[in-house]
Amino acid sequence: MLSPDRLRQTLLISLLTALCTLVLIPATDATAVDYPTLSSIQSACADSGWTAGTNPIWNLTWRQKALYLGLLIPSSPYDTGPRSHVTPPEDLLSSVDWTNVSGRSYVSSVKDQDTCGSCWAFAACGALESIREIHNDTECAIENLSEQFMVSCCKANSGCDGGYPAGTANCLRDTGTVDEACFPYTASNQVCTNRCSDWQSRIRDISAWSWASTYPRFPTLNELKSAVSQAPVWTTFMVHADFFAYKKGVYRHVLGPILGGHAVLMVGYNDSTSSFKCKNSWGDKWGESGYFRVAYSQIAPGGCQFGRWTQNYIVGLVACLPYDPDDIAEYDWTSVEGEPLVTGDDE
């Protein structure tokens, strides 16, 4: 019979061995989880409204696939904060598509985050790029903002190891980002000081942000449609194994386990297909030229929890890059075309 000390030592060794095994065999390793094959996904989604096929992401190992995610799930209910205005259902359009508004796109080109868990930064920059373009109207081309700046300089998040919903929005509000030329993307955890020397004069940020719904409940269909009716929005969902094989159509989860959370840019919806349209950050060779559509039914917990964390951004003054700071400094903030903007009383 083992002595108490010997028994404790044996149990400790067993525990350490088990922990080492968990570290050496990650949850994304195909030896630990039974992941679906492409043929099994194609069979499962045959009658589900979408098509699966090979693409640059699908051809990676499961461990590499997981690196294309990056949403960090809050361990507790997210920050309480303002809620976006919700448009009554009867006032909503039957469809919205910010990539085609009377022939014009208010959405920047599809980008590729590579094997860096920076989806949160790509969705955030995409939302800010679109909002600035909407405010600019026809004054200048869509700005290409720096995801690398957010990856390297947002202290509330973890760079290529992921980002939190509130941490991302707070970073855009409190720190902002710069243009791509100031800090080009390298899909790595560069130090923040690698940004350009005049970065402070090139900052682009938001003045405020709000949630599309109230935690802990899931957003309603009306709340998500209302949010994206105002502008493209930062949103999230849980990625199942079958999503990596998405080729075209309206996605519904049919097969495979969850690999992690993901942030994307929601750019519209269509009642005729009961789906939302989103821009992904996996390059234009994936999905529908970098985009995907997802069914309204996937909002629910039984789907992929689409729209779980959805944010509206608000911007103040919008200027094209490059701009002359003196022009802004000399601007009369008390009125625009005779309409007062500033009163004598602070609220």
Image: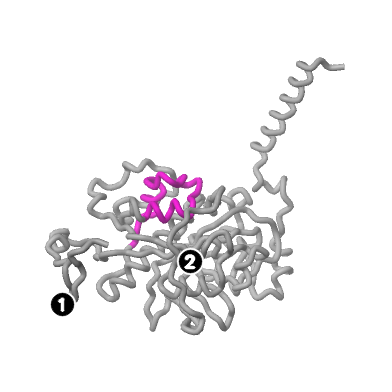
Residue 212: which numbered mark, if any?
2
Residue at x 62%, y 51% (from the top left corner): 61
> In which quadrant of the rendered view does residue 49 lie?
bottom right
Q: Which amino acid does the dot numbered 1 rest on?
A: Gly
Front residue of this view, candidates 300 and 152? 300
> In which quadrant of the rendered view does residue 8 lie?
top right
Q: Residue furthest right?
A: 1
Could you tell me which quadrant the N terminus lies in? Answer: top right
Q: Position of 112 compared to 255: left or right? A: left
Q: Position of 24 compared to 165: left or right? A: right
Residue at x 69%, y 28% (from the top left corner): 16
Q: Position of 31 compared to 79: left or right? A: right
Magenta residues, as a range? 144-172
Residue at x 35%, y 65% (from the top left corner): 314
| Residue corresponding to mark 1 | 338
Q: Residues within 10 Å of mark 1 (few under 14, many from 20)?
A: few
Q: Which of the marked residues, 1 or 2, is nearer the chain's N terminus? A: 2
